[in-house]
Amino acid sequence: MSRRVLVDDLIDAHDVAEILGLSHRNTVSKYQVRYPDMPRPVVELGRGRPMLWLRSEIERWHVKTAAQGRTQLGRRPSRPQPRAGRGPIADLESGC
């Protein structure tokens, strides 16, 4: 079963780091180890290749963990939020 998402909702490690208030995108992989409940990438093409997350999942997780005192609220994303119903749609294989 595949998952349909708007392409504009996909973000890379740089954007994840920005949302979380991290100074470098490489710290995202450390967060994945430190926080097992952190959303996993929806697109993972293999070692050395970009990974993509859903912006809404990362933002929701970040607000939740900050409220629990596990992380701090960071900077807000500088990119405008995509509008619902706009942009191309991608089918993602489940388990990607």
Image (cartoon, grey):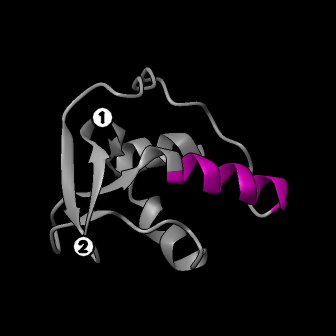
Which residue in the structure is indicated by mark 2?
1
Residue 77 location (% of width, % of height)? 51, 30
Principal secondary structure, stretch drawn in magenta: helix
Residue 82 location (% of width, % of height)? 39, 26
Left or right of 70 in this view: 37: left
Q: Amino acid at mark 2?
A: Met
Give the quarter of the figure containing the N terminus: bottom left
Residue 58 location (% of width, % of height)? 53, 52
| SS state under label 1 | helix
The answer to whether residue 66 is above or below residue 46 is above
> Is residue 93 part of the magenta span, yes or no?
no
Residue 43 location (% of width, % of height)? 25, 62
Q: Mark 2 against mark 1, which lies toward the viewer? A: 2
Point 44% across, 20% down: residue = 80
Give the quarter of the figure containing the C terminus: bottom left
> Is residue 63 part of the magenta span, yes or no?
yes
Magenta residues?
57-69
| SS state under label 2 | loop
The answer to whether residue 37 is above or below residue 16 is below
The answer to whether residue 42 is above or below residue 11 is below
Of residue 24 and residue 93, the one placed in the foreground of this image is 93
Q: Amino acid at mark 1?
A: Asp
The answer to whether residue 22 is above or below residue 28 is above
Left or right of 64 in this view: 85: left
Residue 77 shows in this picture: yes
